[in-house]
Image (cartoon, rainbow, N blue to C red):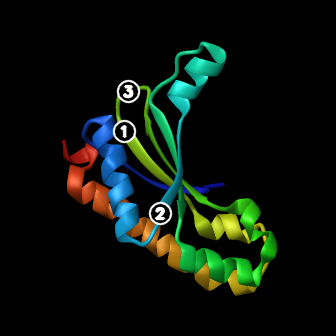
């Protein structure tokens, strides 16, 4: 089952993270949390791991609308966007597919919200690719 939408981009990892955050902001999302998995695993476990960041993205009006329809939706928020290095050095930007995510709730009232978030995430990924270029263009 596919549960993310993603793109592979060129560029330095930190630049990709910054570009992704800016693109999210342009679509009305704030980043509520930024988890550096590489640093966390090094600190907590002493383990080396690839560069990997989890960005907890939230669009307040859409979150409010969703929570009004389904109070338990908060367990699925914020929507995560990840930026990570692959084994072969590519940088991927991947967002949860909100249509799959809210499908768990089995509430038709959330369908239009999920569609709206999906469209915004698609525009975020396109903006990041437009800004940095895709790996296939390199």
| Residue named by callout 3 | 88
Indicate the secondary structure of the residue bearing disc 1: strand
The x, y position of residue 92, in whole percent, is 41, 43
| Residue named by callout 1 | 91
Residue occupying the point 23% across, 59% down: 130
Q: Is residue 11 above or below residue 26?
A: above
Residues marked 2 and 3 touching at CB (< 8 Å): no
| Residue named by callout 2 | 30
The x, y position of residue 64, in whole percent, is 64, 79
The x, y position of residue 20, in whole percent, is 36, 53
Q: Residues within 10 Å of mark 1 (few under 14, many from 20)?
A: many
Residues marked 1 and 2 touching at CB (< 8 Å): no
In the rendered image, the quadrant that contains the N terminus is bottom right
Judge by depth and name the residue closer to the eye, 105 or 64.
64
The quarter holding residue 121 reads: bottom left
Q: Is residue 50 above or below residue 66?
A: above
Q: Earlier in the sequence, mark 1 or mark 2?
A: 2
Distance between the Cα atoms at labels 1 and 3?
A: 9 Å
The quarter holding residue 27 reads: bottom left
Judge by depth and name the residue closer to the eye, 55 or 122.
55
Residues marked 1 and 3 touching at CB (< 8 Å): no
Looking at the image, which residue sits at the far top? 46
| Residue 103 placement, left or right of 132 | right
Distance between the Cα atoms at labels 1 and 2?
A: 22 Å
The x, y position of residue 54, in whole percent, is 53, 44
């Amino acid at each position: 089952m596919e549960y993310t939408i993603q793109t592979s981009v060129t560029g330095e990892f930190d630049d990709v993270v910054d570009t992704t955050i800016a693109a999210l902001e342009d679509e009305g999302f704030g980043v509520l949390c930024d988890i550096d998995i590489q640093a966390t695993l090094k600190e907590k476990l002493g383990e080396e791991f690839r560069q990997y960041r989890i960005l907890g993205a939230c669009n307040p009006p859409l979150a409010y609308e969703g929570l009004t329809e389904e109070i338990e939706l908060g367990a699925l928020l914020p929507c995560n966007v990840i930026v990570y290095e692959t084994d072969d050095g590519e940088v991927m930007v991947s967002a949860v597919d909100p249509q799959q995510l809210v499908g768990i709730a089995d509430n038709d009232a959330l369908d239009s919200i999920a569609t709206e978030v999906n469209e915004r995430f698609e525009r975020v990924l396109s903006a990041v690719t437009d800004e940095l270029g895709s790996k296939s263009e390199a």
